[in-house]
Image: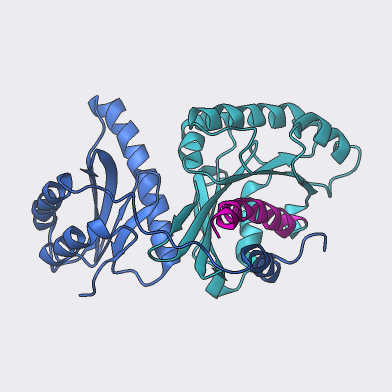
Chain colours: A cyan, B blue
Amino acid sequence: MSVVNYGTREITCKIVYYGPGRSGKTTNLQHVYSQLPEERKGKMVSLATDTDRTLFFDFLPLDLGTISGFATRFQLYTVPGQVYYAATRKLVLQGVDGVVFVADSQSRQLAENIESLQDLHANLAEEGLDPRTLPLVMQYNKRDLPASEISPIEELDETLNFRGVPHFGAIAINGGGVFETLRSIASIVLGRLSAPVAKST
Amino acid sequence: MTRPTVAEPWVAAPLKRLMDDARLISGVMLYPSGRAVGQFGFTNAADVMSVCALTSAINASARELGRQLDGKPFLEMHHSGAERQVFMARCAAGGQEFLFVGVFDRESSLGVVEIYFEEFQKALVNLRPDADAPKVVPAGDFEGELNRSLDALFGPLGR
């Protein structure tokens, strides 16, 4: 859950990029890292194999600046998508505040997308988090591939986005849709904090 | 030596004592999930977050490795580099489990760190994590400031 430290006036939120293997989760973080000014980001940590597949996780700390007197920071994580890294995904999901589900738009990857989404729901439930209410944004990546190879966004949305959460088409390899997605999940996660604030002021 | 920076005041005194006695260069106490409780020796919040994320992951890996190889979780880890060494271990306060990671150089040694970490553990046992920290709610136009900050950093939605 979001950590609001009233003593040090800090807000820290954890966002996890989830999705099947090779869907573009790490690419999302790499683009964010490459575009943000030095003073707004920490080092990007990537625990990957020799073939560049995420072994454990990627991690990128971001500084959003001061909002209403609180230093606000985001911790962006990815999980390894391959099915055999289930234990790692559970670990990374601990304390999550919001999830970006990065789906692979390729038609032949639809089953993997569905399996990964089901895996996400099962792991969230194990963590005691309600998959129906946790902040979530869908990203349909690889929209630059030939139309014959990818599913229409409407079709992906129909199959994967049963909650009707915000969704974005993306071409993470060149940055398309990456910041829109991050902007959206950040707004939802931090917006949740303002609700109790409004009540108590 | 500077004083520790703590998110929870109850840990400040024992952390300062450990830092001084064991001659640690830097260290972080954190929840197993990776949330920092207190730190010393770091000047950049992003570095603290990175150390916490990695320590949390190492702890989970070591735990499982211990279960598989030794039948029970490993409780301590030590890595020796060319100039600096890292010590990681678990501790508890008020029934809550925490992790600690400390960095030291030739001014200290693993044995010294272990001795004073044991004292640190004993000091923590009788302390209780403070769940009743005074709350000062964010003031002003939280949503407006949030949107301006997000716009500045990520660009406006629907651009």
Is residue B1 shown above or below B108? Answer: below
* Residue occupying the point 59% across, 37% down: A81
Residue at the far right in the pictured view: A148
* Residue occupying the point 60% across, 63% down: A33
Answer left or right for B38 relative to A152.
left
x and y percent of residue B126 in the render?
15, 46
* Residue B94 in which image quadrant: top left
* Residue occupying the point 76% across, 65% down: B156
Name the foreground residue: A102 vs B130. Answer: B130
Name the foreground residue: B45 vs A191. Answer: A191
x and y percent of residue A47 in the render?
48, 49
Please identify the quadrant where the C terminus of chain A is shown: bottom right
Segment colored magenta: A177-201
Magenta portion: prevailing SS class: helix
x and y percent of residue B49 in the render?
42, 58
The answer to whether residue A48 is seen in the rendering is no
Say how many tags the image has.
Answer: 0
Name the foreground residue: A82 vs A67. Answer: A67
* Residue A106 in which image quadrant: top right
Residue A188 falls inside the magenta stretch: yes
* Residue B29 in which image quadrant: bottom left
